[in-house]
Image (cartoon, helix red, strand yellow):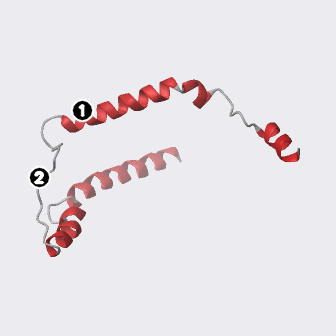
Amino acid sequence: MKFRVRICLLLFLLVACLSSHVTASEKWAGVDESVVEKYAKEQGREPRDPIINTDQGDLLLFVFLMAGAVGGFAAGYYWRVLVTEKPRFAGGEQQKASQG
C-alpha cells in the first residue's frame, strides 16, 4: 500500500511541476495591468514610477529583513507572555466577577 502512495505522490509532483511550467506564460496580465491601469486611464491618470522603487537592487530584501527583525524582536520580548503565562482574567476570576 505504501508503494502505491509513493507512486501517486511522485506522479502528482511530476504533473504539478510540468503544468506550472506550461501555464506560466506572458499572455496573462496581472491585476495592475488589466484592471487598475484600465480605470486609471479612463479617469485621465497615467502610470508613473513609484516614490520608493523596490525593484532596484536588494531594497526589497532589506525591507523584508527589517520587518522580520522587528517581528522577531517583538516575539522574543513577549515570549513569556505568548507561551507560558496565562491571561489575567482566567475562567475562575471571570466567573466570580460575573456572579458578584
C-alpha gap between disc 2 and disc 1: 20 Å
List x then y, in percent, for residue 26. Answer: 14, 61
Q: How many marks?
A: 2
Instruction: Name which quarter of the figure residue 21 lies in.
Output: bottom left
> What amino acid is found at the position of numbered circle 2 in the picture?
Asp
Q: Quadrant of the C terminus?
A: top right
Residue 61 appears at what percent x and percent y?
Answer: 24, 35
Q: What residue lies at 83% left-to-right and 47% top-to-bottom?
A: 98
Amino acid of disc 1: Phe
The quadrant holding residue 15 is: bottom left
Res. 16 image quadrant: bottom left
Q: Position of residue 73 (x, y in %)?
A: 43, 26
Residue 37, can we see it? Answer: yes
User: Looking at this rendering, what residue extends furthest in the bottom direction?
Assistant: 42
Residue at image position (85%, 40%) is: 96
Tag in front: 2 or 1 = 2
**Which numbered disc flags the more N-terminal residue, 2 or 1?**
2
Contact flag, marks 2 and 1 (Cβ < 8 Å): no
Task: Name the residue furthest right.
Answer: 100
Instruction: Give the crowd class for mark 1: few <14, some 14-19, many >=20 residues within 10 Å.
Output: few
- With 94 as the anchor, is 31 left or right in this view? left
Task: Decide: few, some or many residues near mark 2? Use Cα within 10 Å; few <14, some 14-19, many ≥20.
Answer: few
Residue linked to disc 2: 49
- Residue assigned mark 1: 62
- Using the image, determine if residue 26 lies above or below residue 10: below
- Which residue sits at x=21%, y=62%? 32
9 or 71, nearer to the observer? 71
Frontmost residue, 24 versus 77: 77
Q: Judging from the image, what secondary structure is the residue with disc 2 in? A: loop
